[in-house]
Amino acid sequence: MSPDLVTPGSGRSAAEVNEQIRALWLRSGGSLSAQEREQYELLVVEWAAAIRDRVVRAA
């Protein structure tokens, strides 16, 4: 695993993670390599956790 990959549950906001997802897609030109796909999947998991945390805090 690359050291620059994001660890899910890092405490970043959903907006911050979403920005990283968008940047990844822009850098890749819309076609992810295997390594980029792995990073994307980790970012999506982190984003979903951030959304859940926000919903739980709002409740």
Image (tube, helix red, strand yellow):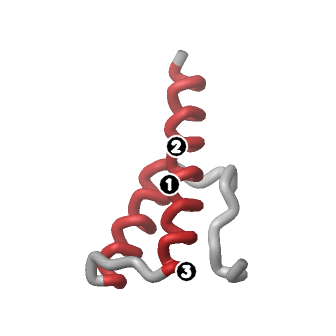
The residue at the far front in this view is 34
Amino acid carrying mark 3 in the image: Gln
- SS at circle 1: helix
Q: Quadrant of the N terminus?
A: bottom right
Q: CA distance from mark 2 to mark 1?
A: 6 Å
**Number of other residues with Cα within 10 Å of mark 2, as a class: few under 14, some 14 to 19, many 20 or more:** some
Q: Position of residue 49 (x, y in %)?
A: 59, 42
The foreground one among 23 and 44 is: 44
Q: Are marks 2 and 3 in contact (CB under 8 Å)?
A: no
The foreground one among 17 and 45 is: 45
Instruction: Give the residue pinned by disc 2.
Output: 48
Instruction: Give the residue pinned by disc 3.
Output: 35
Q: Quadrant of the C terminus?
A: top right
First of labels 1, 3 by sequence position? 3
Q: Residue 12 lies in what quarter of the image? A: bottom right
Q: Are marks 2 and 1 in contact (CB under 8 Å)?
A: yes
**Residue under the image location 32 percent in, 78 percent down:** 31
**Residue under the image location 49 percent in, 71 percent down:** 37
Instruction: Give the residue pinned by disc 1.
Output: 44
The foreground one among 14 and 26 is: 26
- Note whether 41 is above or below 1 in the view shown: above
Q: CA distance from mark 1 to mark 3?
A: 14 Å
- SS at circle 3: helix
Amino acid carrying mark 2 in the image: Ala
Q: CA distance from mark 2 to mark 3?
A: 20 Å
- 40 left or right, relative to 56: left
